[in-house]
Amino acid sequence: MRFLFLGAGAIGTYVGGSLAAAGEDVTFIERPETAAAIAAHGLTVRTKEATRVVRDVTVHGTAAEALAAGPYDIGVFALKSFDTRTALDELVATGHEVPTILSLQNGVDNEPTIAATLGAGKVIAGTVATAVSKPGVGEVVEEKHRGIGVALGHPLSVELVAALNRAELSGRAFADANSMKWSKLLTNLTGNATSAILDETVAQLFADRRTYSLEVAVLAECLAVMKAKGYRVVDLPGTPVRALAWATKLPRFIAQPALGRALGAGRGDKMPSFHIDLHGGRGRTEVSFLNGAVARVGAETGVPTPVNTLLTDTLEALSAGDLPLDTYRHDPDALLAQLP
């Protein structure tokens, strides 16, 4: 298959580099300076089993240049959700054929956005459960191998799963795209917004009775919205999401230690993405596409979502500079006092 990756970030480099190492035809669109670095040094994909340096990839500096060299079977979006609209506009503006897009993005809004622009038959829902870090340009480290989910229903879905498996990426097909994407959303919510707002690790959040209750409420609201929409909680590759959902219904004295070990202690001092984005001064996070999606769909279905709404509004205000970063630092009581 011919793949076109929009960007060589952590997931794009990991998936694209692995596919290229397995013999697939892989092209990237990247900024000129990054494109030059990759062209000179290739991509490095580090796993526990091996370190692979991949040079057999093509890199273009613009969307027009890349699409002119098409056609491609699959375009891959591994972008932040707030970049989806811009990426689509850039592709369409070239006037060239835009391939079917595999969205490996977090959140539940990207596939509808892509379908509205390119057509319902031009998008495949995907989700990455494997944990990856990016220490440098063109270099990624597989921190925990789990796998990649791909929704069925598109003529290329089965072939795509096979390509992922040839690349040792543990592809797995899912019959229900919405259940797959919302189950991933459930895992993305855990400790993410609260960590950024309170400037605390996930382990700290789950060790404190107050913030533990807040985190359980975040998940419970998401589960209620999923139920209202008729979406099932499904296990993702290497990720027991159903156990996470089940744990929210257990008494605190049983669930808190278990969730603390599973979700907090295993991360060490590594902070969630919202914390990295907020305290790294990036000026925006994906909170409106994660917690905000729960709040929005909750409003549409009549499901109350006060906690996800509060976390969304608060983190948006902190990111925009409307609130000082230390407003709620290490002060869960002050944050909880904002709940209606």
Image (cartoon, rainbow, N blue to C red):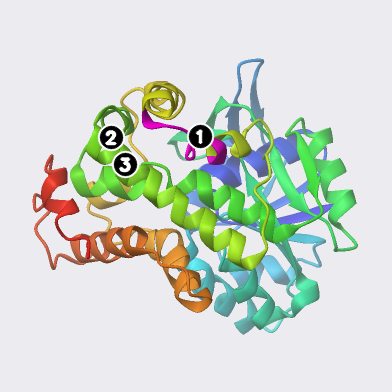
| Nearer to the camera, 297 or 328 | 297
Q: Residue at x 53, y 63 (%)?
A: 225
Q: Is residue 52 above or below residue 214?
A: above
Q: Where does residue 241 sit, x and y in percent of width and height?
A: 60, 39
Q: Which residues are magenta?
A: 245-252
Reading the image, the residue beneath label 3 is 213
Q: Is residue 255 visible?
A: yes
Dot 2 or dot 1, earlier in sequence: 2
| Nearer to the camera, 234 or 18 | 234
CA gap, disc 3 and disc 2: 9 Å
Reading the image, the residue beneath label 2 is 205
Q: Residues within 10 Å of mark 1 (few under 14, many from 20)?
A: some
Q: Where does residue 261 sit, x and y in percent of width and height?
A: 42, 21
Image quarter of residue 240: top right
Q: Residues within 10 Å of mark 2 (few under 14, many from 20)?
A: many
Which corner quadrant holds the C terminus?
bottom left
Q: Residues within 10 Å of mark 3 (few under 14, many from 20)?
A: some
* Residue type at numbered disc 2: Leu
SS of the residue at dot 2? helix
Reading the image, the residue beneath label 1 is 247
**Residue 175 part of the magenta-drawn span:** no
- The answer to whether residue 56 is left or right of residue 40 is right
